[in-house]
Amino acid sequence: MTEKRLYLGRLVIVLVFGLMVVGCDDEPKKTYNTKTYYYEAYSITMSQYDTFVGSVPAGNNYSFSEIQGFRNILRGFGGTFVESNSGVTESELQSFANQHGLGGVEYNQVKEALDSVGNLITFFYTTSPSTMIWVYVEKE
């Protein structure tokens, strides 16, 4: 009888511990409808920007893999890292774009292109006339 109580006691302890671990998840749950994004930003010289623009075929209907290729070209310039972030919500992405002067109709067009292709590259002017910031954004 004592052995049975000891076994049941251990089982209860294990079950309680298991429930505590599962019940104490502080990570907020993402819903299936929540879109998140990854972005990275680098600063390059205007000369590098001009070289890049001159090397890319004209147009605005690029595929996901073409945009990734453009990202590799830009990374090859060895620009200065500005920032990157993942798990960015739609509202955070819009706030980031607005802070860099991209808003309104222009933002909506860029966002539509991002959501249809899955990634994009955009450029922002800086306070220095000799540099430009490129930003790669990808849906997670």
Image (cartoon, grey):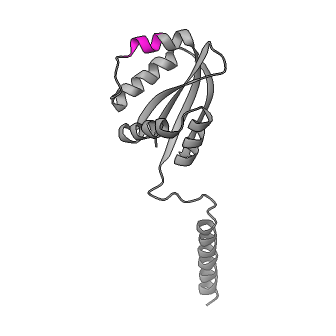
Residue 74 to residue 103: above or below: above
Extreme-front residue of the structure: 105
Residue 71 included in the magenta stretch of the image: no
Tell me where residue 27 sits by quadrant: bottom right
Image quadrant in which you'd find residue 132: top right
Which residue shows up at 49% across the image and 28% down it?
Answer: 122
Which of the two residues, 3 or 47, is positioned nearer the viewer here? 47
Where's the N terminus, which quadrant? bottom right
Is residue 90 positioned above or below 102 on the image? Answer: below
**Viewer-closest of 134 and 71:** 134
Q: Is residue 89 left or right of residue 69?
A: right
Q: Residue 137 at what x, y percent from top left?
A: 49, 34
Dominant SS in magenta: helix
Q: In the image, what residue occupies the spot 36% across and 32% down?
A: 64
* Quarter of the figure with residue 114: top left
Left or right side of 125 for 62: left
73 relative to 19, above or below: above
Where does the image place residue 50, in percent across and percent down from the top left? 49, 11
Q: Which residues are magenta?
A: 51-56
Residue 121 to residue 76: above or below: below
Query: Residue 109 or 80: which is nearer the viewer?
Result: 109
- Residue at 60% x, 72% y is 19
* Relative side of 66 to 36, left or right: left
Q: How many marks?
A: 0
Between residue 60 and residue 26, name the one nearer to us. Answer: 60
Tell whether 122 sits left or right of 64: right
Image location (x, y in percent) of residue 66: 36, 25
Q: Residue furthest right?
A: 127
